[in-house]
Each structure stands twice: as C-alpha cells, then as structure tokens.
Image: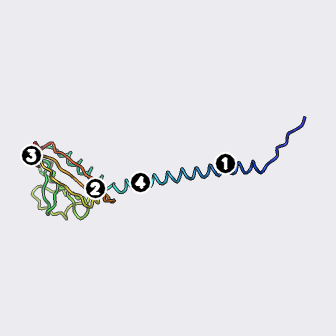
Amino acid sequence: MRRRQFQSHTVDFLFTLSLFCVFAVCAFLVVSMGVKVYRSTARYLEDTYSARTALSYVAEKIRQHDAEGQTALTQLEGRNAILLTDEIDGSIYETYIYPDGGYLCELVVRQGTEVFASMGQQILQAEGFAIEDLGEGFLRFTVPDSRGQVLSFLLHLRNTEGGGI
C-alpha cells in the first residue's frame, strides 16, 4: 500500500487567506452599518427627548385633573399657563404649569398666594413650549425639538361641555 502524502500548495494557502479576508470585510461592513443605524436612532431619541417628555408630562397632569373645576387656562406674567386645583385635607392647592426661560416649570401653592413665574420649579428644558386655547375645551401644546421640528399635542378636556376653559 502506498500512502498518500499531502503537499501544501501555495494556491490552497492563498484561497484560505482570501476566504478569511472576505469574511473579515463582510463582518466589518455589517458592524459599521449597525453602528450607523444605532447612532442615528440614538441621536433622534436624544433630540426629541425633552419635547416628547414635556408634552407627555403636561398631558398626564391634565388628565389627572380632568374633573369639573379642576383645570383652567390662565395667564402668569403674560404667558399662558395651566392651572390645576386640588383639595387636600380641607385646603385648596393650585398647581401652575407654564413655560419660563426655556424650561417647563411647575409651581404648587395654597390658593390665594400671590404667584410669580420665578417661583416655579424647572421641570425640564423645553425651549419654545407654547399652550394655545382652541376653544370648546381643546388645548394645543407645541414645542420644537433640538432639530427645530415642532411636535404638537391636541388635548380635549372632558370637564368642559361645549364652552371654553
């Protein structure tokens, strides 16, 4: 019997090396595309975080107070503000939500207290936040994100029956 001897050829080595290089290049391209998609998604979420959070925060606060006489649109130093009223242990408290100095602010005081915009707590940055009364219980909240795209939220108060706030 004759034993077969395997000889190493240069072509075998080059084929294996080229196959490995093709695999490495494909793996690198897939990873680089994934990084690009991740970056764009993360950038979009970061750009719209404050705007989306501000709109969600205001909408949820209003929904929590959507009962007769608990929600009103008012003015605070010449700016539209949401006024939410709560009764706690026989005392009436007012919560003002309003834009001030590029921030969405909230101020909670006992009813009858003189209020100023500077007294409020800054909730989050929301440059350009605006509150509009569209009549018949509809409110529009708008805020631009960091890219300049304006996000808007339309809310109807159930506690108003055909009239303004």
Q: CA distance from mark 1 to mark 2?
A: 50 Å
Task: Estimate the x, y position of residue 157 in percent, counting from the top left.
Answer: 16, 45
**Residue 35 located left or right of residue 94:** right
Q: Amino acid at mark 4?
A: Ala
**Residue 60 located left or right of residue 111:** right
Q: Badge 2: how crowded within 10 Å, few (<14), some, or many (20+)?
A: some
**Mark 4 touching mark 2, by CB under 8 A?**
no
Which comes before the other along the chain, label 3 or label 1?
Answer: 1
Q: Residue at horizontal 31%, vertical 59%?
A: 148
**Mark 1 touching mark 4, by CB under 8 A?**
no
Q: Badge 4: how crowded within 10 Å, few (<14), some, or many (20+)?
A: few
Which comes before the other along the chain, label 4 or label 3?
Answer: 4
The circle drawn on residue 119 is none
Q: Amino acid at mark 3?
A: Gly
Q: CA distance from mark 4 to mark 2?
A: 19 Å
Q: CA distance from mark 3 to mark 1?
A: 74 Å
Is label 2 or label 3 in front?
2
Q: Which residue is mark 1?
A: 19
Q: Which residue is mark 2?
A: 150
Task: Estimate the x, y position of residue 17 in percent, counting from the top left.
Answer: 69, 51
The circle drawn on residue 163 is 3
**Mark 4 touching mark 3, by CB under 8 A?**
no
Q: Which residue is mark 4?
A: 42
**Residue 63 located left or right of residue 148:** left
Determine the secondary structure under disc 2: strand
Q: CA distance from mark 4 to mark 3?
A: 43 Å
Q: Amino acid at mark 1?
A: Leu
Q: Residue at horizontal 23%, vertical 51%?
A: 58
Which comes before the other along the chain, label 2 or label 3?
Answer: 2
